[in-house]
């Protein structure tokens, strides 16, 4: 009897979802960009969303992040409905993201960028007379984060002077500074060299098993390396949602995505 209860508890824990999307639609005037998408991601799952150009990947990403409102449908993060919750408030639900276009404070140093990200989620009193870099607690946390990606030596460098690869790595670091339970990444390796992509992937693959990763990706190899399940979009609709192995062998996916030349 005790063993049965233990198994039921394990099953119940496994069935908990970090992200649920129900019948999501988005119209831009007469353009139906996202068409009734349903999606559930379990806690700790690695889920990739792929598709050809114009498939609706970025629109879906922006809907889930709260960057744009849906025309219809609902979004839940850990059972809390966040459909109308603005992007910045979803951070407090455990949601963090990086966008395809790097968005950093380029005129500030690397350390200042990280401290600002940390300060944004801390319950600390704001004072315009106190420099954030003098906050020892934030300074220590920033040092720990930067050491994880071997960037502490660049802490006093302005972000604008760093390489594009380092900037992408920093953006991921800032997303992780929010201590997310879900992290959404929009083509994180876009524009990176092979070596830089490997470094970024190592960090993503090294995330805790309790962190859900939602990856929007154009590069098939990246998606297959990271994901446990892959959703394939075409013209705003889901045409497949399965394991990487089954997606590789899916004839419809091959016809619509893999067999289609992209500019």
Image (cartoon, rainbow, N blue to C red):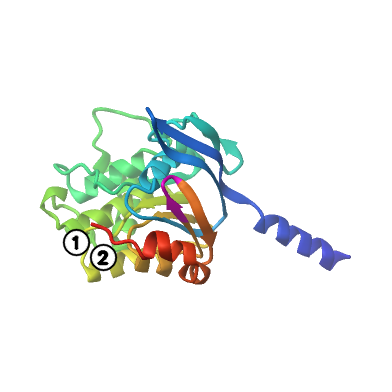
- The correct choice, above or below, for 24 with respect to 203 in the image is above
- Residue at position x 24%, y 66% from top? 196
Residue 116 showing in the rendered view: yes
Instruction: Tell me the crowding category of disc 1: few under 14, some 14 to 19, or many 20 or more residues within 10 angstroms, Cα based.
Output: few
Q: Which residues are magenta?
A: 232-236
Q: Identify the residue at horizontal 31%, vertical 46% (top origin).
A: 99
Q: Percent position (x, y) of residue 32?
A: 42, 36
Which residue is under mark 2? 150
Residue 181 drawn at (x, y percent): 50, 50
- How would you classify the magenta stretch by its main secondary structure? strand
Question: At 37% from the left edge and 52% from the top edge, which residue is drawn?
Answer: 185
Left or right of residue 95: residue 105 = left
Residue beneath disc 1: 153
In this view, which residue lies farthest toward the left?
Answer: 161
The numbered disc on residue 44 is: none
Q: Quadrant of the C terminus?
A: bottom left
């Amino acid at each position: 009897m005790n063993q049965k209860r233990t198994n039921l508890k394990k099953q119940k824990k496994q069935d908990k979802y970090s992200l649920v999307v129900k019948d999501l639609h988005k119209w831009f005037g007469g353009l139906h960009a996202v068409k009734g998408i349903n999606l559930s991601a379990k806690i700790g799952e690695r889920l990739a969303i792929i598709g050809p150009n114009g498939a609706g990947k970025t629109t879906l990403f922006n809907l889930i992040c709260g960057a744009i409102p849906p025309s219809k449908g609902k979004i839940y993060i850990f059972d809390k409905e966040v459909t109308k919750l603005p992007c910045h408030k979803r951070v407090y639900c455990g949601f963090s993201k990086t966008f395809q276009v790097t968005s950093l404070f380029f005129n500030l140093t690397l350390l200042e960028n990280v401290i600002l990200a940390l300060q944004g989620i801390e319950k600390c009193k704001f004072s315009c007379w106190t420099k954030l870099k003098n906050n020892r607690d934030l300074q220590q946390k920033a040092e720990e984060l930067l050491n994880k990606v071997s960037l502490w030596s660049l802490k006093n460098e302005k972000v604008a002077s760093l390489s594009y690869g380092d900037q992408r790595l920093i953006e991921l670091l800032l997303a992780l500074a929010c201590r997310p339970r879900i992290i959404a990444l929009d083509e994180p390796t876009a524009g990176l060299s092979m070596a830089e992509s490997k470094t970024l992937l190592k960090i993503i693959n090294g995330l805790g098993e309790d962190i859900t990763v939602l990856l929007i990706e154009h590069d098939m190899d990246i998606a297959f390396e990271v994901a446990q399940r892959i959703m394939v979009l075409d013209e705003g609709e889901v045409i497949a949602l399965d394991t990487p192995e089954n997606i590789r062998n899916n004839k419809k996916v091959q016809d619509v995505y893999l067999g289609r030349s992209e500019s």
